[in-house]
Amino acid sequence: MNGISSYGAYLSNQYNNSITNNQRTNSTKQTQASNDKDEVKLSDRAKNLLKELRQTYGNVDFMVASYSSDEEADTYLSRGTKDFSVLIDPEELEKMASDEDTKKKNLGIIDEAMGKLSDMKDKLGDKKDEVTRLGVSIDKNGTVSYFAELETLSEKQRERIEEAKENKKEEEGGYIQSSRVKRTKVTADSVDGLFDKINNVDWSKIKEEKPDPEMNRFDFSI
């Protein structure tokens, strides 16, 4: 990898990290509000279990909501503000709260999922910089699905950044604006399946989107 490409990769990584942090900060209240709304429907036993889960897994966002499709589950999971997100159907959480075997089974699933997702991200190499969120959902039947949200700069924007760096050109007092990004989500019924889908994402077929206007600037003075 030449110097320009390395710098482009660095900027992409910095951009993804900054916009992810911004999205996570902005979505915290929304996520908590959603959680609170769903928790109203839970029994005291289930609420206590949810509190226990959140205390035990400090780097995991636990969300409780009913959903009927992967797309609906993705919507909830994408609101996560931590390293990982876990979406549990309220019926399944109630089962966990009232049945020790169900609780042990699902805690085993969560433990295994967090470990496998962490290992998977490490194995992605350079592609791990495209991953903004990882999560797992457990529906009312106990069915498990794995989730990843991805984001990258458009090719035109990468070229613009590399050209600006190559020419040592500064725009807007040392900044260059990022006008477009690409985002997508993938789901699978196993971590291995998720790994394959992430590796096979064809960014050329994904439409560009406008990023958050507050987070669309790169500082060349770094």
Image (cartoon, rainbow, N blue to C red):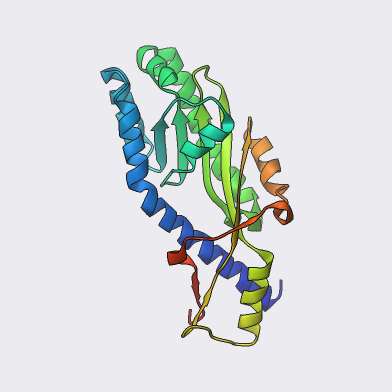
The x, y position of residue 209, in whole percent, is: 58, 57
Quarter holding the N terminus?
A: bottom right
In the picture provided, is 3 more to the left or to the right than 29?
A: right
The x, y position of residue 69, in whole percent, is: 57, 28
Q: Is residue 98 above or below residue 87?
A: above
- Residue at 30 percent across and 33 percent down: it is 36
In the picture provided, is 118 more to the left or to the right than 5?
A: left
In depth, the one of 132 and 35 nearer the eye is 35
In depth, the one of 205 and 161 nearer the eye is 205
Residue 22 placement: quadrant: bottom left
- Residue at 47 percent across and 56 percent down: it is 20
- Residue at 46 percent across and 65 percent down: it is 213
The x, y position of residue 116, in whole percent, is: 57, 38
- Residue at 71 percent across and 75 percent down: it is 2
The x, y position of residue 18, in whole percent, is: 46, 62
In depth, the one of 65 and 13 nearer the eye is 65
In depth, the one of 112 and 144 nearer the eye is 144
In the picture provided, is 24 more to the left or to the right than 74?
A: left
Residue extending farthest to the left is 44
Q: Is residue 43 above or below residue 1?
A: above
Q: Is residue 94 above or below residue 218?
A: above
**Callout count:** 0
